[in-house]
Amino acid sequence: MTDATSSQTPGGAAPNDGRDASGQMIAADGRPLKKSLARALRAQKLRALALIAPLLLFVLITFIAPIADMLFRSVENQIVSDTMPRATEALQDWDANAGELPPEEVFEAAYYDLFIAAENKAHTRLGSRLNYEESGMSSMFRRAGRGLDDIGEVYQDQFKDLNGDWDEARPWAELMGDATWISQLESWDGESTAPRVALRDDIEALLPRTAEAYQIFAEFVQTVDEDNPLEEEPWTMVHTALYQDLLDVDVSGYSGPRADMLKAADALVADPTFETITFKDGFEEIDEDWLLLENWRVIKAYSPDYTIGYFATAADLEKTPDGISLRDEDERIYAKLFQRTLFMSLVITASCILLGYPIAYLLSNLPMRTANLLMILVLLPFWTSLLVRTSAWKVMLQNQGVINDTLVWLGMVADDGRLQMINNQFGTIVAMTHILLPFMILPMYSVMSTIPPSYVRAAKSLGATNWTTFWRVYFPQSVPGIGAGSILVFILSIGYYITPEIVGGTSGIFISNRIAYHISSSLNWGLAAALGSILLVVVLALYWAYDRIVGIDNVKLGG
Amino acid sequence: MKLTKTLLATSALTVAAAGAYAAGHGMSDSMTLVSWGGAYQESQDKAYLQPYLAMNEGVSASWDESSAEAVAKLRAMNEAGNITWDLVDVVASDAMRLCDEGLAMEIDHDEMLAAAPDGTSASDDFGDLIVSDCFVPQIVYSTTFGYRTDMVGDTPPSTVCDVFDLEAYPGKRALQKRPIDNMEWALYCDGVEKDAIYDTLSTDEGVDRALAKLDTIKSEVVWWTAGAETPQLLADGEVVMGSTFNGRLFSAIAEQNQPIGMLWDMQSFDLDGWIIPAGLSDERKARALDFLKFATDTQRLADQAKYISYGPARASSAPLVGKHETLGIDMAPHMPTDPANASNVHIYDYEWWADNRDDLDAKFQAWLAQ
C-alpha cells in the first residue's frame, strides 16, 4: 500500500507515470503493483495465522478432531467384516430374500472366523454390536465362543485315538514347520522377538487349509500368548482343517517328516466309520439361534464397512435386507424427542427473553452503584454449581415442597390437590430458564448500556409517548442483544442434559439424555454419534436460518 | 538453592528406592480402585483397603467414584490405550459386558483367590454367583421396596403387588427408570408364574402385557435413576413406596430413623463385585491380584457387613457376619439373603437381559415418552 502511494508522489516519480509498458501499475521497486500488494498482504496474513496458530492447533487437536472422530462412528461398521472376513465374503453370493438359510460354505467360513475371533476374544464384541439390531445375537455369539471346540473335537478325538501324536505340539510342528523355524524355536527364550512362522512349501501345497489354520495358530501362540508353538498343542480348528484337506487330497506321494502319521490319518478319514459333523449341525448344537434366517439376514445387512443403520435407527427407521422401513410404533422415540427438544428450547428461550429483558433494561439505566449490586445478584447463581441450583428447584417445586406447602397454608389449593410442578415439562422449563437466564441478561445488558440515553430524550422531546419512545426508538436498538442472548440460550438448551435428567421425569427429558444413555449405559456409541450428528446439523441449520432471517451481523455480544 | 538441590536429590533417591523396592517385589506400589462412593465405598475402605494398607507399608491407593460409568470409561480408556484403573467395582451385568467387550481380564478363581478356611475352593465357595469369567463376586444386594409406615394406614403392604394396587395404597410410587425388574414385577402381579416370567417376556405379547400392567400405575410413578433418590423421596413424603437398593433403605431406617418399612417380597437379587481391567502392566496386575485375593477372602467379606447391610458373596462368610460397627445391632436379619427375608425372591436372569436389554429398553423408553 505504502509502496503504491509513494510511487505516485512527484518526488518518487517513476517513468511512464508509474506504469510499465503493458500499462500495469508498478511499485517503486519495479514490480507490478498487484504482485507487490499481494505479497505484503500475504505476509500480514501469515503473521496473523502464526499468532492464532497455537489456539487453532489447540482447538483442532482437543475439540474438532475428537468430535469428528466421534461423529465418524455413526457410519463406521468395520467390526463385522473385520471379525468375520471369510463369512462376510461367503455371504456375498447368498440371497437374503430367498427364504433359505445360507449354504454350508458360509457356516464353514463362520466356523473358522469365529474360532479365531474367540481366541482373540473379539466374538462377543461383535455379538454386542449385532445385538443392537436383533435381540439374542449377543448370547448366540457368546455361546459360539464356548462351543466351537465341540466341532473340532469330533475330529481331534478320532485322530488322537489313532495316534496320540496328533494331540502333541512337537509332531505337529515337525509335520507343518520349516526346519529353520523349528530350530529357531528350540533356541528361542520366549522373551526376545519371536522367529517368523515359516511352514514348508510342500505341505502348504498339499494341505492348504491345514497350513493356513496352523499358521494362524502358531502366530497367535508366539505373539499374543508369547508361548512356544513347540510346546502348545494346536487348536481343534487345525484338526478340522486337516480333516477337510484329507477328504480332498491324495497324500500317498508325500514323503516329508511324519509321513506315516499323515498317511494313517488319511486312511482313517477314508474309512466309512469315520465320524463327521457338518458345520451347520455343529452350529445348531451350539445354539439353535444360529439356524434362524433372521439372524443371518442381519449379519448380511451389516456386513459392509459403512452403514446408515445407526442414522436409520436415530430417525425411527429400520435397516433390513429389504431396505429401510419405519419401525414399529412401540419403538419410535427419537423423532418425538427431537421435536420435544426443539419445542422446549424455544419455550425456554422465549421465557428467558421475557424475564431477562426488564432486568437488563433496569441494569443499564440504574446508577452505577445500584447496577453493580444488581449485577452481582444476576451473577451469583451463575457462580453456583449447576447441580445445587437444580436440586434447589426440586425442593421448591416438589409435591411436599416449599411452593406447594405455602399454597396449601394460604388455602389456595387443597392438601390432596397439590400442584404437580416437577418431573414434567413444567419443571424442566422453570429450572432451565433460571439456569440459563444470565446467558440472556449479560449480552442484552452489554448492548443496552451502549444505547445513548439522548435518543430516548430526543424522542420524548419531539412528542413521543413513553410507549412509542420505547417501541420505536429503544427496542430496535436493543434487538442485537436479544439476538445474541437467544442464540446462546437456545443452543445451550438444545444440548442440555443434567437439569432435564433430574427434574424432567418422563415428559421433560431431551434428546441429549438419550445420547448420554447410549454413551454410558447401552454402549451403542454408533447410535449416540448418529443422534449427535443430527443434533449438530439441526443446530447449524437453525443458525443458518437465523442468519437469513435476522442476519448474524445484527448480533452483538457487547458494545 | 542448595536446599532445593538437596530436596531434589532426596526425592529422586526416594523415587528410585521405591521403584527398586517395587521392582524387587514385581508389584506396583500404588493402585486406583473404582467404586460407587458413599456409604458403600466407605465400607469397602474400612473392611478391605485400610487393613491391606496397614499390612503393606509403602503402598498407596486412591478411590475413584466412577462405577456408574465404568463400562463406558473403560472402553474409552482402552481405545486411548491408557488404563488408569487397577480394580473396578461393578454390578454383575456390567462385568459380563466388560468381559464380552474384552475390557476385563479373565480370572482363574481357584488359582487367584483365597480358598475358604475349611479348604473349600473359591469357585465352590462363590458357587453360582460367578456369573462371568471376569467377575469376582463381593456382595449380594437386592432391589426391593420401602414404604412410609405412617402413610399406608393400618395394613402395611405385604406383597410386591401392593405396589400396583392404587386403591388400597393411593399415592406416588418410585420406580427405577429402566425395564429391568419393573417388567418382571408387572408380569408377576399380572398373574404370570415366577418360572414363566422370562418366557413370557420373550414374546411381544408378554412385553405388551407387562407394559399394560405398568400403565395402570404410570400416572402415579416417579422414576428414579440414582439409588439415593428413593430414600429421599420417602423421607420427604413425596412417595408412599418406592424401590431401591436394600442397603439404602437400611441406612434410612436404622441409621436415620425415618418412618420407613421394608417390603422384602419379590426382592430382586443382584450381585456386585470386582473386575480387573484388561491390559494392565505385569506389576500393576500383580498388585491388583494381591489386593483382590486379600479383599475377597472369607473374613474380609464378612467384615464388610459390619458397615452396610449387603450379604457377603461367599457361603463361608455368612456365619461370620456380626453386629453393626456403630449401632451394635445384629446385621444378619437385615441381609437380603436372610431366610426370613428371602422367602419369595426374584432371580434376575443376566443372560436373558444381556440379549434383550437393547430391544426392551427401546420399547420401554418409547412407552415412557408416550
Image (cartoon, rainbow, N blue to C red):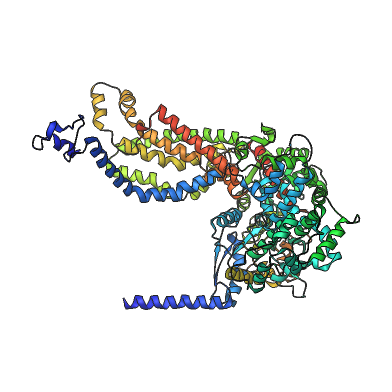
Tell which of A50 and B133 is nearer to you.
A50
Tell which of A468 and B288 is nearer to you.
B288
Single out the residue that lies furthest toward the right. A273
Single out the residue that lies furthest toward the top. A463
> Residue at position x 39%, y 44% from top?
A378
User: Based on the displayed image, in which of its 4 quarters is residue B44 positioned?
Assistant: bottom right
**Position of the C terminus of chain B by quadrant:** top right
Percent position (x, y) of residue A52? 34, 48
Image vertical order of residue B159 relative to residue A424, above or below: below
Q: How many marks?
A: 0
Residue A17 seen in render: yes
Image vertical order of residue A149 relative to residue A481, above or below: below
Percent position (x, y) of residue A380? 40, 48
Percent position (x, y) of residue B262? 71, 55
* Horizontal side of residue B322 vs A516, given as left or right: right
Percent position (x, y) of residue A175? 75, 65
Residue A399 seen in render: no
* Horizontal side of residue A51 vs A299, given as left or right: left
> Residue at position x 44%, y 31% from top?
A544
User: Based on the displayed image, in which of its 4 quarters is residue A369 positioned?
Assistant: top left
Tell which of B146 and A470 is nearer to you.
A470
Single out the residue that lies furthest toward the left. A11
Tell which of B32 and B338 is nearer to you.
B32
Image vertical order of residue A171 relative to residue B144, above or below: below
**Position of the N terminus of chain B by quadrant:** bottom left
* Horizontal side of residue B251 vs A467, given as left or right: right
